[in-house]
Amino acid sequence: MAAENFIHQTFELEHQKTEIEFTDILYLTQPLTRTAEWAVWGCMFDFCISVLAINYDKKKWQVFQDLIQYCGLIFKFEKVCIVCERPCKISFDQENLLHAEGEAAVQFADGYSIYAYHGVRLPEKYGKLSPMKWQARWLLEEDNAELRRVLIQGIGYSQIIEQLQAVELDSWQEYTLFKINSDIDVEPIYLLKMTCPSTQRIHVLRVPPDIQSAQDAICWVNWGIAPEEFSMQT
């Protein structure tokens, strides 16, 4: 019975904590006004003033226009009003995700910045540098799996092979299979390095970790076609 009472009391405390946190959120969001929502009213007021020539308070009308043009969020409390300016800069990628390389994706006039890479928020230590300057060794120090994924994407497998001294497992002609021994991703990283015979350009692709030979990796990359079956190599 004592154990049941303890569990019941613990549940009640956790439930109260959740309610308090939710109440805190409501306390902040209920007074929230997005000035963009006032733009519709602004259009109507502008029509009445400009076309219908109604009488209006010029000072209040100017304040209203400034709020819509320059302010993003307004939190209205009793005797206190918090007004947030719009960002002076905001950048997106082609998929309309927050994104900037080597600079802030969102910048406010007071210096507050948000760094992001294709929608993933970055710490300043990563975001302020171009991905070309990111270091593969950061993967060994980063605990956040999503940030490691972003670092892998930005650094590229070619640089990871070079900087983390990948272990060569097998090779066949101009193909080499590597393994990254460090635990930098959810599963082991196996990479197939391919050197074009004509241009000497290097391409690196990730392959499943159960592949143990370069020829098997080539077969996987080419949708099951064995390298011996290639009629012509370019």
Image (cartoon, rainbow, N blue to C red):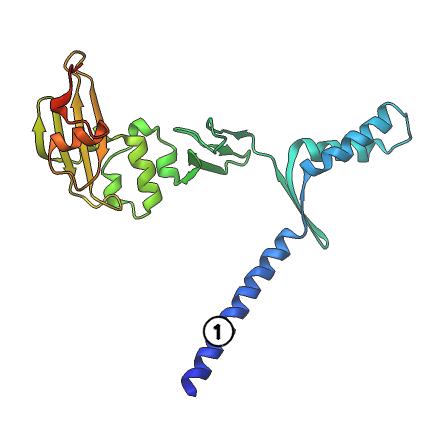
The residue positioned farthest toward the bottom in the image shown: 1
What residue is rendered at 34% in x and 37% in y? Answer: 150
Residue denoted by label 1: 11
The residue positioned farthest toward the top in the image shown: 198
Which quadrant holds residue 73?
A: top right
Q: Is residue 74 in sight in this rendering?
A: yes
Quadrant containing the C terminus is top left
Which quadrant holds residue 7?
A: bottom left
- Return the x and y of residue 15 as percentages of the image width and height: 52, 69
Quadrant containing the N terminus is bottom left
Q: Is residue 220 left or right of residue 79?
A: left
Q: Is residue 7 left or right of residue 198?
A: right
- Graded by Cα atoms within 10 Å as few (under 14), some (14 to 19) or many (20 or more), the crowding at tag 1 reads few
- Return the x and y of residue 87 as percentages of the image width and height: 56, 33
Q: Is residue 38 left or right of residue 229?
A: right
Q: Is residue 165 in sight in this rendering?
A: no
What residue is rendered at 22% in x and 23% in y? Answer: 203
Of residue 221 and residue 96, the one placed in the foreground of this image is 221
What residue is rendered at 77% in x and 29% in y? Answer: 43
Numbered marks: total: 1
On screen, residue 26 above or below 46: below
Which quadrant holds residue 46?
A: top right
What residue is rendered at 17% in x and 42% in y? Answer: 210
- Return the x and y of residue 2 as percentages of the image width and height: 42, 87
Query: Could you tell me which secondary element the residue under label 1 belongs to?
Result: helix
- Return the x and y of residue 160 as percentages of the image width and height: 21, 33
Amino acid carrying label 1: it is Phe
Q: Is residue 139 left or right of residue 126?
A: left
On screen, residue 27 above or below 110: below
